Image (tube, rainbow, N blue to C red):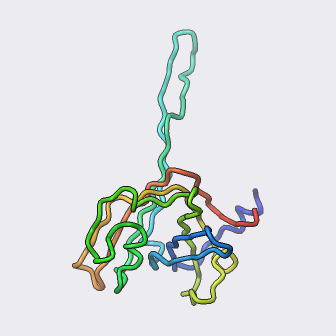
Amino acid sequence: MAEITNELEVEGSTVSVIHVDESETEPVRTILAHCTKEDLSVTIDEDDEDFNPGSFRRTKRYRTNNTIDIEVTSAIAPDLDALEKIGAVDSDGKVTFSGEDRKIQAADDEFIEIAYFDHKPDYTSVDVEADSELLHRAEDCELTSPEVDPSQTPPTASWTWWVEGDFYIDYSSSA
C-alpha cells in the first residue's frame, strides 16, 4: 500500500468526469464534464452511534451508515448530450425527474470515472487508465440536484451523484 500512496500525487488540475459503458467488447467512455479540481468535490462521510452500557467504562461506537457524494460543475455542452446521458434532460433539452433515467448501474456495466490530468487530453486518442494521474471509479450512482447557472460565462451545469455502490480511489482494470 505504501507504494500506491507514494504514487498518488496529482499535479495537474484538469479533471474529466466520464460515463463508462463496458457492455460491449471495448469500453465506451463519454465525457460528461471537463472541469478543474476546484469545480469538483468527492465527499466520503460516515456516521456512528454511541452506546454506553453500564458494565463498560468506555463508550462503544458503531458505524451506522456512510455516504459518498460526487459534486461536479462544468460548462454546459452546446448539444446537451452529456446532460441527456446522465438523465438530467431529455432529448429536447427539457429537465427530467425520472429516477430510472438518472441511474448508472454496475449491473448494466455502466460506471462513473473521474480522471485527473496534467494536460488537456485529446479524447480521441487518450488511454484514460494509462494517461491519467489518478482515476476514481464509482459504481451504482444516482444523479440528484441538477442545477443550471446562466449567470456564469459560459453558463454552467452542476449536479451531484449519490454513490450507492463501490468507490475506488485509484482504479485500474488490471487490479
The percent position of residue 80, horizontal first and vertical second, equals 35, 80
Is 82 on the left or on the right of 13, as rendered? left
The percent position of residue 4, horizontal first and vertical second, equals 73, 63
Q: How many marks?
A: 0
Residue 116, above or below 57:
below
Is 101 on the left or on the right of 7, as rendered? left
Q: Quadrant of residue 120?
A: bottom right
Is 3 on the left or on the right of 144, as rendered? right
Q: Outermost residue, front direction?
A: 24
The percent position of residue 15, horizontal first and vertical second, equals 51, 76
The percent position of residue 155, horizontal first and vertical second, equals 28, 81
**Towards the viewer: 97 or 134:** 97
Residue plotted at (48% across, 73% down): 37
Residue 83, above or below 96:
below
Q: Outermost residue, top direction?
A: 55
Residue plotted at (47% across, 29% down): 49
Which quadrant holds the C terminus?
bottom right
Residue 149, above or below 5:
below
Q: Quadrant of residue 156?
A: bottom left
**Towards the viewer: 72 or 21:** 21
**Towards the viewer: 60 or 67:** 67
Residue plotted at (32% across, 60% down): 145
Residue plotted at (62% across, 58% down): 168
